[in-house]
Image (cartoon, rainbow, N blue to C red):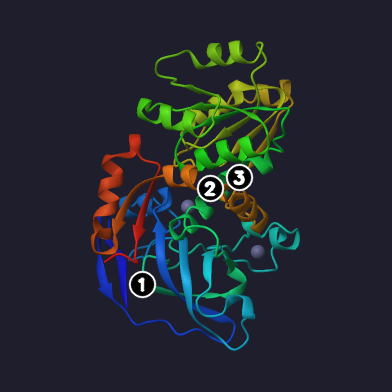
């Protein structure tokens, strides 16, 4: 079978590799669509500390089951369309024992710590699958990235009473915005790329602020009676946005960090106390988050399709990283269609 391999920093190419064989509790999936994640791009750039090269990237996976082992439930028989939950669980660490497998100490995500879905077929355990025959095939690959943002707002206990500021209009930020809207909150997006403003408003976001053009704190103050946001979700990963989250949140508010900072962040911690903040980390997503995303995008085909900025046929998948890198300011999701070419 054919796989796209990140061989060296900045270099991806196709390789012919042996097709994997499913064990009794596993299924063999024909991969149909794979989305590119920021972490894949970081692996390509050599700035993903969790990933070693060479690596087959890809953990946003939609496909169709080709064969199933003898112990696999009938739900996952041949021909079923599935979404892959790309994280692993050890069952023994404190997270796993506390019902928070998404933050497993020993998690290995497909395409990050181990080879992923950017290949014509992949083998996974049946408990890492969600069957869905309703969503459009390409939309199956949107569920994982959106679920990461949905998890962030679940961590922030977002409700219809809240004004939520989301820093960053990448796919994780967009997931947080949609997740907050799904919970009935008012959503203010902060995004430096002007080209993303109209699309974000089109998704139902209530306000978009460009912090390069407006005084962010002042604008937010006028939108919140001087209080600041009830919840701030940081989905950028820069020291300044990590700090801004603390400044923008209201007294007794909640800050959720889902962006992954690549350098140290220094704080004046006094606001942690004075505001009595809940500061929450957010990692990956739970099965409940996947289900919430599926419920949200079911019947919203147009909205879901609007998140897919560019689809590359499989034969041109090796060009997708450079395309995304050059077009980040106007791109939500870049996807590979393995069923094409
Ligand atoms: Zn991802
Ligand atoms: Zn664990």
Q: Is residue 259 at all visible to an observer of this figure?
A: no
Task: Answer with the quarter of the image where residue 90 lies.
Answer: bottom right
- Can you say which quadrant of the picture contains the N terminus? bottom left
**3D distance between C-alphas at marks 3 and 2:** 6 Å
> Which residue is pictured at 51% across the width and 80% down the height?
78
Residue 96 image offset from top left, x and y in percent? 70, 62
- Can you say which quadrant of the picture contains the C terminus? bottom left
**3D distance between C-alphas at marks 1 and 3:** 29 Å
> Which residue is pictured at 40% across the width and 61% down the height?
33
Report the residue marked by disc 2. Answer: 146
Q: In this view, does 264 lie to the left or right of 333?
A: right
Upstream in sequence: badge 2 or badge 1: 1
Q: In this view, does 271 lie above or below 140?
A: above
Mark 3 secondary-structure assignment: helix
> Which residue is pictured at 61% across the width and 55% down the height?
290
In this rendering, the count of numbered labels is 3
> Which residue is pictured at 29% across the width and 55% down the height?
312
Q: Is residue 286 at all visible to an observer of this figure?
A: yes
Local packing at callout 1 (Cα closer than 10 Å; few below 14, some 14-19, many 20+) is some
What number is the disc on residue 120?
Answer: 1
What number is the disc on residue 150?
Answer: 3
**3D distance between C-alphas at marks 2 and 1:** 23 Å
Which image quarter has ligand 2? bottom right
- Circle 3/circle 2 CB separation < 8 Å: yes
């Amino acid at each position: 079978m054919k796989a796209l391999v990140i061989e060296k920093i900045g270099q991806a190419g196709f390789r012919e590799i042996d097709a994997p064989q499913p064990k009794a509790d596993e299924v063999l999936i024909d991969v149909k669509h794979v989305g590119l994640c920021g972490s894949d791009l970081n692996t390509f750039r050599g700035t993903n500390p969790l990933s070693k090269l060479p690596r087959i990237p890809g953990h946003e996976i939609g496909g169709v089951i080709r064969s199933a082992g003898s112990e696999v439930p009938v739900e996952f028989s041949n021909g079923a369309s599935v979404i892959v939950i790309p994280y692993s669980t050890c069952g023994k660490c404190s997270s796993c024992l506390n019902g928070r497998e998404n933050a497993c100490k020993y998690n290995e995500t497909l395409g990050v710590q181990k080879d992923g879905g950017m290949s014509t077929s992949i083998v996974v355990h049946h408990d890492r699958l969600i069957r869905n025959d309703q969503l459009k095939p390409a939309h199956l690959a949107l569920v994982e990235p959106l679920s990461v943002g949905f998890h962030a707002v679940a961590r922030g206990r977002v409700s219809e009473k809240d004004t939520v500021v989301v820093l960053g209009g990448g796919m994780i930020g967009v997931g947080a915005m949609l997740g907050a809207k799904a919970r009935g909150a008012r959503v203010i997006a902060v995004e430096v790329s002007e080209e993303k403003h109209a699309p974000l408003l089109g998704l139902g976001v209530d306000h978009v602020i460009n912090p390069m053009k407006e005084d962010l704190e002042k604008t937010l103050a006028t939108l919140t009676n001087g209080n600041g946001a009830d919840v701030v979700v940081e989905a950028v990963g820069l020291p300044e946005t990590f700090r801004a989250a603390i400044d923008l949140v209201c007294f007794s508010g909640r800050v959720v960090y889902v962006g992954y900072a690549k350098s140290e962040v220094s704080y004046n911690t006094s606001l942690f106390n004075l505001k009595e903040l809940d500061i929450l980390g957010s990692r990956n997503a739970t099965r409940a988050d996947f289900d919430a995303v599926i419920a949200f995008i079911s019947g919203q085909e147009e909205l879901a399709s609007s998140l897919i900025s560019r689809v590359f046929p499989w034969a041109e998948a090796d060009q997708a990283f450079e395309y995304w890198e050059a077009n980040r300011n106007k791109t939500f999701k870049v996807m590979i269609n393995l069923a094409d070419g």
